[in-house]
Amino acid sequence: MPQALAPNERLTVDAIEVEVRRSRRRRTRIGLAFDPAGRVILEAPLDATTKELRAVVVEHGRWLRARLAVLKEQAVCLSMPTYVSGELLQYLGEAYELVVEAGPRRVSRRQKTTQLRLFSDVRGVVGTITVRLPDTDPVQVKRTLDRWYRQEAELRFAERINEFRSLPWMRKWSRDWGVRFMRSQWGSCATTGRIVLNTHLVKVPERLIDYVVLHELCHLVHHDHSYRFYALMRAHMPDWEARRLELDAYLPLLAYD
């Protein structure tokens, strides 16, 4: 029996920092992902050996370095939310100013036709998200916003999934999907066909949501990242690689649940 690494062990392979995350759900395939800090994540079966893990990093070394460089250069500057009036929140790729008010419980979003100000990534604030609560403590504001974002995610993702209803294999899919926060990935597709989308995905532009949705839907046909998988992606979204790079700029969103 080959010796396995301890869960979440960190490796350095050709100057690339790697964190190993083992899962009983993985049987043979070793997956690659990135966390918000820019570290490479290897999602591996329990019995994967050090040699096998290092081989995956070496094999994809050039691609990994390119992706890490993009993350460093293009990352959207986002600070840890404090849930007080005046800070900026993301929704469908736009910045909104948070307004916290005392009063009956309510969350509302208002679009503005003029810019309020510019911030770190030189995009204008387009409106406000107002949270009205009897108790305006930041903990309560966060809980309320979390529920609102989840409701919006379920609504928006259902719309985006419906946009792909004409895909040939969609008639056979049970439409088993859900949402939850995930620290290191935007979406997942189980071998059972269940798709899970990250609630934070509702904060990025719709064209990038479409990329993640199509990525997971293509896994219903090819549950790997083989040539056939990417050929299927390209057939239905020729610019998927550009969208993937654009989405990498939003990885800092995953740093905070």
Image (cartoon, rainbow, N blue to C red):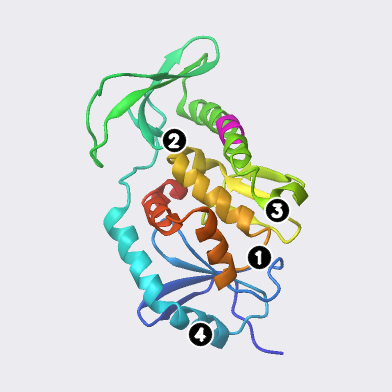
Q: Residue furthest bottom?
A: 1
**Circle 2 sits in a helix, a strand or a loop, which is it?**
loop
Q: How far apart are marks 2 and 3 (CA)?
A: 28 Å
Q: How crowded is mark 1: few (under 14 residues within 10 Å), some or many (20 or more)?
A: some
Which quadrant would residue 115 be assigned to in this image? top left
Query: Residue type at mark 3?
Result: Trp
Image coordinates of residue 93 in percent, x first then y, are: 39, 37
Q: Residues within 10 Å of mark 3 (few under 14, many from 20)?
A: few
- The first of marks 2 and 1 along the sequence is 2
Q: Residue 180 vs residue 38: left or right?
A: right
Q: Name the residue under label 2.
A: 92
Q: Distance between the residues labelled 3 and 4?
A: 34 Å
Q: How far apart are marks 4 and 1 (CA)?
A: 21 Å
Relative to 108, say whether 27 is above or below. Answer: below
- The first of marks 2 and 3 along the sequence is 2
CB atoms of marks 3 and 1 within 8 Å: no
- The first of marks 4 and 1 along the sequence is 4
**Circle 1 sits in a helix, a strand or a loop, which is it?**
loop
Q: Mark 4 points at which residue?
A: 55
- The first of marks 3 and 1 along the sequence is 3
Q: Is residue 155 magenta?
A: yes
The segment highlighted magenta reads 151-156
Image coordinates of residue 109 in percent, x first then y, are: 45, 20
Q: Residue 91 vs residue 71: left or right?
A: right
Image coordinates of residue 41 in percent, x first then y, are: 50, 67
Q: Mark 1 points at which residue?
A: 223
